[in-house]
Image: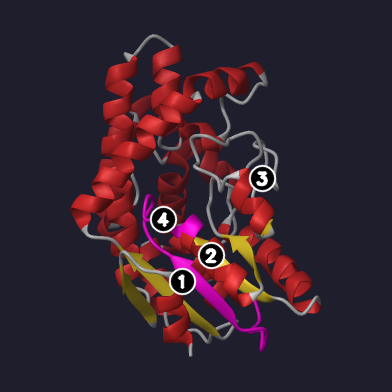
Amino acid sequence: MKPRASPSLLVIAGPTGAGKSQLATELAESLGAEIVGADSQQVYRYFDIGTAKPSLELCHRVPHHLISCLEPTEECTAARYAALADEAIEDIHSRGKRVLVVGGTGLYLRALLYGLATFPPVDVSLRNRLAAWAKEAGDEALHRRLHEIDAATAARLPKGDSLRMLRALEIFEQTGKPASEHWKEHRFQEERYAHRYFVLSPERSRLYEAINQRVEHMFKRGLLAEVERLLGMGFRGVPAMRSVGYREALGVLDGQLSEAKARLLVAQNTRHYAKRQLTWFRKEGGAEWVPLPCSPETLLQRLA
């Protein structure tokens, strides 16, 4: 990816449950901006409740891009996300609007703002061999193996994220160097867009309470019914079904979990995910931390 001189972007990042969507919509209204999502699950159609997509009311107030833009069977790599975001940004800018990028997927934001590190192409035979081993050995063994050769990447990825763990193993097998080392070498690339990068920083107890409330709201809104509908559409094996919320709901429908246990697990796993997000954002150069609660006016003052 080549550097892009314009336009400048405003980025609102932060952990799940921090209130990014509401604050970003209010800020976008004040600036006459449009929003480009940066969430690896919200890009998929039909996966709505469990991904906590912006409400219809927020989307009516401000145009949102890269929400529900792909079929669940499609792959959305960081590179593809950046390409889709480039198109959306160019379109918004061509209409004289400002661009506000909003989301919690740190890798997507890094790909958009700085491009991607150069990794070897997928070796199909190697991938099939590693996938066969992982299927037999299980996620625990896969995670242990990754920790042995790339502790930094293993710490970042949850044990259920077999696709990314396998890719990290592939990179090591192909290059003899951990994927995390490739990223370190890439850290000082020139920016593709001029930008201001705000990270929402809620107090931990308030964040956890917000996560608990979000989980309860998801189940009340019909998360189990949504997953049942998705299964009827043939989406059991798609990557989004392995994300937090969906895999636990699937466990309920498969008779492996009670609904009460699933709610506890979703809250717990979401808290763990939020911790990983915050760890990622702390390593991003140039990020400006914004204590919560925060009003759009406060952010406008920082932009002045």
Q: Is residue 27 above or below residue 169?
A: below
Secondary structure of the residue carrying numbered label 4 = loop
Q: Nearer the viewer, mark 3 or mark 1?
A: 1
Instruction: Please report the residue visible at 44 percent of the width from the left and 45 percent of the height from the top.
Output: 166
The mark found on residue 296 in the picture is 1
- The stretch drawn in magenta includes residue 18: yes
Residue bearing mark 2? 26
Q: Is residue 277 above or below residue 52?
A: below
Instruction: Please report the residue visible at 34 percent of the width from the left and 17 percent of the height from the top.
Output: 259
Give the magenta-colored segment's residue range. 1-22
Q: Residues within 10 Å of mark 2 (few under 14, many from 20)?
A: some
Label 1 to label 2: alpha-carbon separation: 6 Å
Instruction: Please report the residue visible at 60 percent of the width from the left and 52 percent of the height from the top.
Output: 58
Q: Earlier in the sequence, mark 4 or mark 1?
A: 4
Please state which of residues 199 and 115 is positioned toward the viewer in this rendering. Answer: 199
Q: Nearer the viewer, mark 2 or mark 4?
A: 2
Q: Earlier in the sequence, mark 1 or mark 2?
A: 2
Q: Main SS type for the magenta part?
A: loop
Residue 71 figure quarter: top right
Q: Where is residue 270 shown, x and y percent of the image?
A: 33, 42
The mark found on residue 68 in the picture is 3
Q: Residues within 10 Å of mark 4 (few under 14, many from 20)?
A: some
Q: Nearer the viewer, mark 4 or mark 1?
A: 1
Q: Nearer the viewer, mark 3 or mark 4?
A: 4
